[in-house]
Image (cartoon, helix red, strand yellow):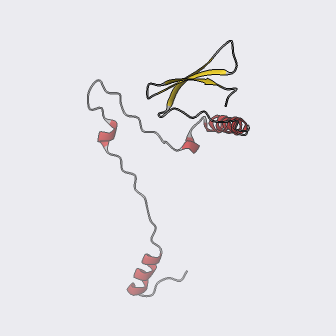
């Protein structure tokens, strides 16, 4: 770096050496309770990489993903169609493996014989 010889060169050098500074400003109202019954707001980072349980959380997500992959990799056997709205509940007959009852949100209850499907 050469020293500036004139005021014009010094201004050009100052413009080239500018640095951006990010200022953190916090509003006091964000950390004060509005009512006495309110809890005091606590600032915290929601960044997942800063969470202390991140490794355990990621491990559990990976295990669950593998379980779901194994569950959905089974061959699709068939579909029971007949309800017009979403099915809310299903029950099997404890004495017969081929009997199934389903209830839908439209108020309809259907009895299914799985040997026919």
Looking at this view, name the residue that lies furthest to the front. Answer: 116
| Residue 97: image location, x then y, percent | 70, 19
| Residue 58: image location, x then y, percent | 64, 39
For the point 35% across and 46% down, which residue is it? 26
For the point 46% across and 84% down, which residue is it? 4
92 is higher (above) or lower (below) than 71: above
For the point 35% across and 30% down, which residue is it? 40
Quadrant of the rendering where the N terminus is positioned: bottom right
- Tell me if 94 is positioned left or right of 40 in this view: right
| Residue 110: image location, x then y, percent | 54, 24
Residues 88 and 67: in front is 88
Looking at this view, name the residue that lies furthest to the left. Answer: 35
Question: Which quadrant would residue 65 be assigned to in this image?
Answer: top right
2 is higher (above) or lower (below) than 115: below
Residues 116 and 3: in front is 116
Looking at this view, name the residue that lies furthest to the top. Answer: 95
- Tell me if 76 is positioned left or right of 30 in this view: right
| Residue 45: image location, x then y, percent | 48, 42
Residues 12 and 7: in front is 12
For the point 48% across and 34% down, which residue is it? 84
Q: How many marks?
A: 0
- Tell me if 82 is positioned left or right of 31 in this view: right
- Tell me if 29 is positioned left or right of 106 in this view: left
Question: Which quadrant would residue 39 be assigned to in this image?
Answer: top left
Quadrant of the rendering where the C terminus is positioned: top right
């Amino acid at each position: 770096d050469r020293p500036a010889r004139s005021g014009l060169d010094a201004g050009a050098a100052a413009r080239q050496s500018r640095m951006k500074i990010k200022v953190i400003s916090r509003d006091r109202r964000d950390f004060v309770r509005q009512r006495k019954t309110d809890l005091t707001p606590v600032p915290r980072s929601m960044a997942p990489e800063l969470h202390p349980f991140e490794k355990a959380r990621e491990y559990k997500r990976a295990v669950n993903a593998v379980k779901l992959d194994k569950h959905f990799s089974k061959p699709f056997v068939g579909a029971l169609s007949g309800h017009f709205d979403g099915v809310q509940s299903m029950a099997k007959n404890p004495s017969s493996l081929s009997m199934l009852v389903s209830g839908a949100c439209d108020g309809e209850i259907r009895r299914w014989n799985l040997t026919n499907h």
